[in-house]
Image (cartoon, rainbow, N blue to C red):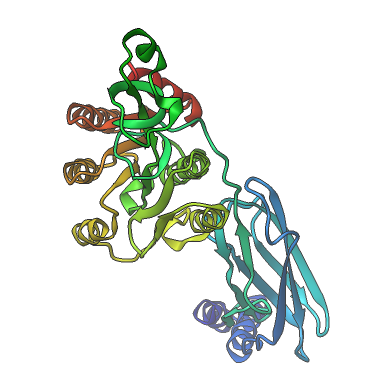
Amino acid sequence: MAALALLPVGLGVLLRHPPLLLVGALGVAFAAYARGDSAPDIDVTIERDLSDPTPDPGEEVTVTLRVRNEGDGVLPDLRLVDGVPAALATDAPARLGTALRPGRTATVSYRVTAIRGVHEWDPVHVLARNPSGSRERDARLDAGGATTLRCTPELEASASLPLRGLTTVYSGRVPTDVGGSGIEFHSTREYRHGDPAKRVNWARYARSGELSTLEFREERAATVVVCIDAREEAYLAPDAESPNAVERSVEAASQAVPALLDSGDRVGVAAFGPGDCRLDPGVGDDHAARARELLATHPALAPTPTDERFLPTTWVRRFRRWLPADAQVLFCTPLPDDYAATVARRLDAYGHAVTVISPDSTADDTPGHRLAGIERANRLSRLRSAGIRVIDWGEESLATELERAAARWSR
């Protein structure tokens, strides 16, 4: 501005033209004002309120941001950008631009849609400029302490999960090849002293006079660990509006855990990803509450990926040491790469019966996306060929896919 202002001043002097000299003088005066004026101090207090800090998934929460000028001077150009958590979508820009006199308050409101997890707001980015805009100060200020939105969905049981034959010594609902007390007939054996009278084969005794005991197929409980692929590679979605595969995997786990607990099975939870996310297998209402809290709020299962370093080989080694010897694994993964399929085969080879629930996050709108879908289909085929049960979860509900899989596996 100063350099441009000197040009009409010089021309006005050379040409002895007063209007040019006047225009140049105004430009010089404005440039001098801009250089001489300082940026105002940011002396403000900020408050942030949530209409409901503990909403259910899908509910809209109104966020109100208030800023008050605590200083003695006017803030001619004050701008604020709220630190909305990355996982939350807003219905309007979470920002404000205003001029604020001393003691006055300005307010901006917007709405966010709640999703599973614990979401903390970052500090507010505040920018204050002088009237000419040549000087500015910026700062990041807390809004009266931490603002946290906690969204914990209820655990809702899906259809009964078809489990494989690996069981515990406790009674349950998984059929075994062991004879004993149960419902389905298994075999007969010679009568032994102390056998209950209700299991004596009285029909045979009436025909031949020989005592024998009926054996029924025992039904035992299983130990199941629900493992969720939460690596950065698993945060896939077919489009911007659809939930990513980690969200769908957590949804599958949220349905599987209560279904298994209601059937009397011992259930644990783990995350195949950064962070130590593990819940030892257990039963009961208290255990269900712990599982619900872990699935909803653990940082390893956040709706967006973390930057924490992850070593998959080390994780597999530690997971094997932690996994009970009689545990089955319900592995929820979109199979984004060959390593996820390798983990499933390796755990199955170690003696832990593996069932894979794979949410389909592929698309077919581009050649690259179609190729990714073909690669995933090949991984599913190889797992089935290795004897691992696979549920390819598409657009249907998980309960529908489970019913189809149970009918297919029972043939």
Q: Nearer the viewer, residue 226 or 89?
A: 226
Quadrant where the C terminus sits is top left
Q: Position of residue 285 (x, y in %)?
A: 57, 53
Left or right of 45 in this view: 407: left
The furthest residue to the front? 209
Q: Quadrant of the N terminus?
A: bottom right
Q: Is residue 297 above or below residue 356?
A: below
Q: Position of residue 17 (x, y in %)?
A: 63, 78
Image location of residue 395, percent across then percent down: 47, 27
Residue extending farthest to the top is: 207
Q: Residue at position x 29%, y 21% from top? A: 187
In this rendering, would 113 be left or right of 324? right
Q: Does residue 363 appear in the picture of this structure? A: no
Q: Quadrant of residue 95?
A: bottom right
Residue lying at 29% horizontally and 39% vertically, measured from the top left: 166
Q: Hey, which quadrant is residue 213 in on the image?
A: top left
Look at 25% across and 44% down and name the residue there. 352
The image quarter containing residue 379 is top left
Q: Is residue 279 left or right of residue 384?
A: right
Note whether 315 is above or below 247 in the view shown.
below
- Judging depth in this view, the residue of 361 and 216 nearest the camera is 216
Which one is nearer the viewer's eye here, 190 or 258? 190
Task: Kindly give the residue lying farthest to the right in the view shown.
Answer: 103
- Residue 380 in the image, given as x and y percentages of width and height: 25, 30
- Residue 208 visible in the current orientation: yes
Numbered label tally: 0
